[in-house]
Image (cartoon, rainbow, N blue to C red):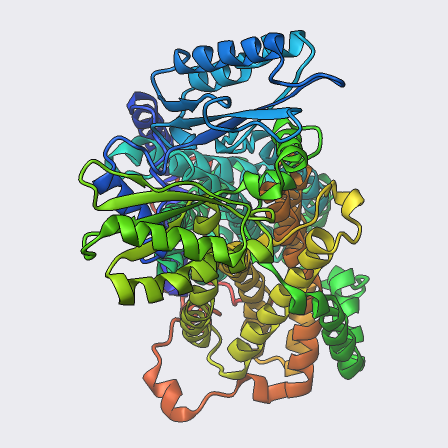
Amino acid sequence: MATFLYKLGRLTFRRRRFVALIWVALLALAGFGAASASTATSSSFSIPGTEAQRAFDLLEQRFPGASADGATARVVFKAPEGEKVTDAANKGEITGIVKELRSGSDQVAQVADPFEAQAVSQDGSTAYISVSYKVNSMELTDQTRDALEEAGKDAQGSGMKVEIGGDALQVMPHTGTAEIIGVVIAAIVLVITFGSLIAAGLPLVTALIGVGIGVSLITALANVLDLGSTTPILASMIGLAVGIDYALFIVSRYRAELADGREREDAAGRAVGTAGSAVVFAGLTVVIALVGLAVVNIPMLTKMGFAAAGTVAIAVVIALTLVPALLGFAGKRVMGRKARKGAEAAESTDAKGAKTPSLDKAKDTAKGAKPNMGTRWARFVLRRPVWVMLVGILGLGVIAVPAASLEMGLPDDGAQPKSTTQRQAYDMLSDGFGPGFNGPLMVVMDGKGSSDPKAAAERVSKEIESIGVVAVTPAQFNKAGDTAMITVIPKDRPSSHATEEVVHDIRDAGEDIKADTGAEVLVTGATAMNIDFSQKMNDALMPYLALVVGLAFLLLMLVFRSILVPLKAALGFLLSVIAALGAVVAVFQWGWLGSLFGVEQTGPIMSMMPIFMVGVVFGLAMDYEVFLVTRMREAYVHGESPGQAIVTGFQHGARVVTAAAVIMMAVFAGFIGSSEQMVKMIGFSLAVAVLFDAFVVRMAIVPAVLALLGRKAWWLPRWLDRALPNVDVEGEKLQKQLTEGPAASGSDSGSDSDGGDGHGGERELVRV
């Protein structure tokens, strides 16, 4: 592979104008397709195989036009002190708003008058209007939302307090500001790392081109493939992060090759042949993790995973082709000002007028050069490997302790900031009616198998009442009389354990009812859907983890020609993920340091968080593993001792891996400032996971373990070594070809006039 990528790097360097033109054309075509495509609609959220989904599907069949899975809203009214909502003036205002809502949008399915639906509190202080829509919350138009928000303003003028809750106001969080913050921080880190605006700008430009193409393609194909408006979010976040990282490693290796005296074209080829090999396999691990989301069998997650994987694949191809092409345009400006001046000063002319290459003087200078921070840290770890390993493992172990108390669910309006209308409506309903009114359950009885559906429905109602709930509405039958809907109001809030127990108790009672009457009882509604979603996530976690880690283990075995190194990489990843989950539980569930991160209401952790973290963090963690350890493996294969190979890997890779991790953390941390609890939790979890994995696991525990293992770390049984294909990530075959003769490095014919002369291929590959 290294040989092929070396030739590819040199080819794209020589044909840089053609390569750049191709990528610009692809970006323009994708942009045109996105601009001309019709606006994407959010595909309905479904969870195949769950009881709540089966109930929704049954309602669609038996109650046509009822829009059982449509968006809902509740306009909550509270009368001024000393008044009641039933007073003539207040009642008139509320009745007028009911009429206004019914005529406000053609997406409205039903508006329930609180005075007819008995939606007035016992003390008369509070009432609410229930609004149901024909489409889900993501398909509501801005006009519909505006009509809902405007509906209560007149009532507020009369003195009543009016707030709106429900998922109708839920919109997909806009992440543009967070991404801009991440790009700005990434630019600062890149300038500090490279000391050159040109070098810093290359990863940003190529990453933005990759994300632009990926997101534009998703937008263009959204309606054709039913991708929905939520799909590009993960693609843009992951694509931007890995796009910057992959280009960062190629540019860094290219600069190192130039510093070793390579000609520019040869340096580009060697950079793509070595660092590019690591990019390919790092990208494959991310793709495996994202495509593996299909195991969960939730269409929305599957589509998001495939879309993000496609964007990552684009980022890999761009790093291998467009980055070396742009390096050809950049010239020596890709080096910092000091490095350029040093190279110019190193070139001297002897008495005969011949130039002495800067490589010789660079080597002489390097002998007395002060070791960088990465070198000093690696040497410290080699002196104290046991202590470094124990401190790292115990430290992450302590942080991981709260993960044992992990409670999962989906956040409701009670987790919103107190300043939002959703949260205030939630609190008003809880105060006036009880917390259970914020999450009513819908019980569906399928009476086709029963000889007396009405008697079966009465039995269902009595069984539910005996469980202990606030209210059970009379059964509402369809026209055929074979299916009934019953609304149940639990005592506790939607995300509580008590409400979850009520759902399970109804389902257990439904089994006995089916055995006795033949009628099937199903529980659905937003609360039941959230419970089933959490359970499905729990059930899918271990198979998903086994698939992703297993495939990545095989992939890393190919890369490192070792069994212990991939095993250590997988165990280290599990440690960092569990520690990150512990930190999430401590902040968002227990409330520790909650005010620092803007957490106003503690509650269960979002049920998709563990799988989401495994999928995203695993791919990113393997990036750092591949980039750092591949450099060690390369040095070891080229003859260095195991200990010296660790030092060499850190000497050349620690600074770049640190910059990549800081950039990744900056991209994710930008989402912590979001007012949405879900987005805030995702940003925090991914940022701390990268912090733990990059700086504790990869930079401390990994070199300590390798130091203790010595040569055993690179052991592979002979039979397995013969069975596994040799992908030559470390460039051993490439080195052999380059040292045997100039023919192996490829011809320089056809180079652009402004390109490098490319005659460095026959030089002996220095050990890096």
Point 39% across, 35% down: residue: 213
Q: Can the viewer see residue 305?
A: yes
Q: Nearer the viewer, residue 265 or 130?
A: 130
Point 56% across, 9% down: residue: 93
* Image quadrant in which the N terminus is located: bottom left
Percent across and percent down for residue 333 are 61, 37
Q: Can the viewer see residue 353?
A: no
Point 68% across, 37% down: residue: 673
Point 41% across, 75% down: residue: 554
Residue 305 vertical placement versus 706 (above, below) = above
Q: Nearer the viewer, residue 522 or 562?
A: 522
Residue 354 vertical placement versus 473 (above, below) = below
Residue 113 vertical placement versus 764 (above, below) = above
Percent across and percent down for residue 262 are 55, 55
Q: Nearer the viewer, residue 289 or 461?
A: 461
Extreme residue toward the bottom, this view: 718
* Image quadrant in which the C terminus is located: bottom right
Percent across and percent down for residue 711 are 60, 87
Q: Nearer the viewer, residue 123 or 347?
A: 123
